[in-house]
Amino acid sequence: MKTVRKISAGAKAPPKRKRVAAYARVSMESDRLAHSLSAQISYYSGLIQKNPEWEFAGVYADRFVSGTSAERRAEFQRMLADCEAGRIDIILTKSISRFARNTVDLLKTVRRLKELGIEVQFEKESIRSLSGDGELMLTLLASFAQEESRSISENVKWGTRKRFEQGMPNGKFRVYGYRWKGDELVPVPEEAAIVKRIFQNFLDGKSRLDTEKEFAAEGIKTRNGCPWVDSNIKSVLTNITYTGNLLLQKEFIEDPITKKHRKNKGHLPQYYVENNHEAIIDMKTFQFVQEETARRRELGVLANKSLNITCFTGKIKCGLCGKSFMRNLRSNRPKFTTTYTDGYVTWKCGSRRIRSGLCAAKDIPEKILKQISAEVLGLDAFDEKIFAERVQGITVPSHGHLVFRLSDGVETAREWKSNAKKECWTDEHKGRLRERMRNFMARGTGRFSAFTTRIKCGRCGGSVIRRANHGGPPLWKCGSRCGIASVRESELREISARMMGLPEFDSEAFKSRIDHVEMEENGRLRFFFADGHTEETAYTTKRKAQSRSMTEEQRERFIAKIKASWVKRKLKKETENHDTQDNSSSQD
């Protein structure tokens, strides 16, 4: 009989609710707009929570920020991050202009949300981003919103310039040394004293770097508690506000969309307001500082007395990257010298000195520069004063080539070859390096021993070197293998300690008290002490044969190993004979 089983229909799962969020924004800080933003947040919260098919995912609101840039809106970025994390399905917003006033940002964001399957609904324009014609309408309306933003910006600029014409600044700007008291700038005594000191230091011939170091040493900080740096000091020295006058529209926003600021160098009119507030610096001093700044700028690095400069500074240009060459003490030279001397000073391309590898230009020894400069100027010996007066600059087109530009307009090319290594490799220099290496080796660090380079062969005069002894104590043998008897290191240490009168060997004492040791023909060691006297002693030249007895277990393992090896060789030989016979049979 057939068996029939009834399958009951399962209950349908309730439809999944959409996670809905809202975005709101106001651009200006005012009571009216703040109330508008609160109203938007309340409206969207109630709208989403009343819909049974929606799940409330939050309201994101940016306060008092422009919609021309997405990066500057923190809540907008947080909303996009939640979208990437899959927490939102639909975004509600009042209008396109609230969502973005930049056409590129709007389309880029909407397209990315579309890839994630997230819909943006614009209430005012009745546009849904996932609909067929949604992107086309967004492109058109976003362009209108962007142009509206540009129009608003132009209106704001017009109002600002009208205030400039009346001598009114654009808001209460911050300036060190002053505070706003109502609509008037009033000096702050403590900060005004720092401003006067900055100007006085400059008048005394100090560079901005000198002032920076001086303030750092005394712990003088800016208004925000930060250290004074070169840019801060420069801003003080060039700010005409300290003379009691104002210069309005020193900067302007080039594009309302990108918000890029630009210095006003004749692009737009400026407005000079005289006697606007109390002065900290008189106009005569300020103008002198500007003239002195221009003079120092013309001199370049030569104007900075705190730098170690020479007649070559700022005059040698790299033909490969255009940077200036800089004076450089070769760091790979011995550390016993701490001054700039001929043979060790070179001129290196600035890009290589600051960040190695950026330029292929090679160093030029200063000695070569002086020699060739004297030849170009027709001098018997180099003269810095004559060089500074007659040479306008030197270009280095490639390694080994120099092009001199003289003050009278003449250009002269010269070639050179460096022999710096040969010249500095003197006997004195070799001796210092040799002594340094001997002291390093005598410490016994790494693969070196206290006896390294200090044991000599009395037969051939060569060095005695350390050799391994197959698990035994190391041996000291003649490096040229002349046949003189070797000595064990353990015995050499014992003899050395006895010759120095010490209970045990000490490497530091050996280095300081014994200059070297010679191995003589007759199995004797001659010690040459640092004070000049010598002493001799005998060392063991013959080695006793060491009998090594085996245990029963070792003997059995040895016999088994020999048998296994013999059986293996026998099997291999029989296999070869068998193969040979098979080959012969096949040939027959």
Image (cartoon, rainbow, N blue to C red):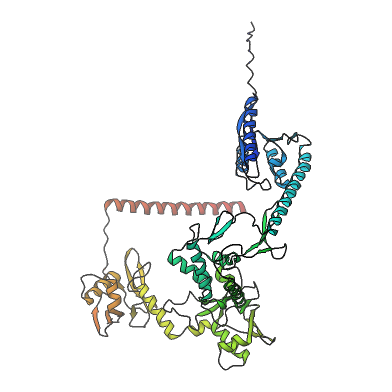
Give left or right: position of 327 versus 459.
right
Does the image show residue 542? Answer: no
Quadrant of the image containing the N terminus: top right
User: Which residue corresponds to the image point at 40% horizontal and 54% vertical from the top-left?
Assistant: 566
Front residue (pair 532, 299): 299
User: Which residue corresponds to the image point at 64% horizontal and 81% vertical from the top-left?
Assistant: 393
Does the image show residue 440? Answer: yes
**Which x, y percent locates residue 129?**
73, 36
The mark total stands at 0
Give left or right: position of 335 versus 324.
left
User: Which residue corresponds to the image point at 36% horizontal and 71% vertical from the top-left?
Assistant: 466
Front residue (pair 467, 390): 390
Give left or right: position of 454 versus 255.
left
Which residue is at the far bottom? 380
Front residue (pair 264, 240): 240
In this picture, is 488 found above or below 576?
below
In this picture, is 535 found above or below 553?
below
- Quadrant hosting residue 413: bottom right
Which residue is at the far top? 1
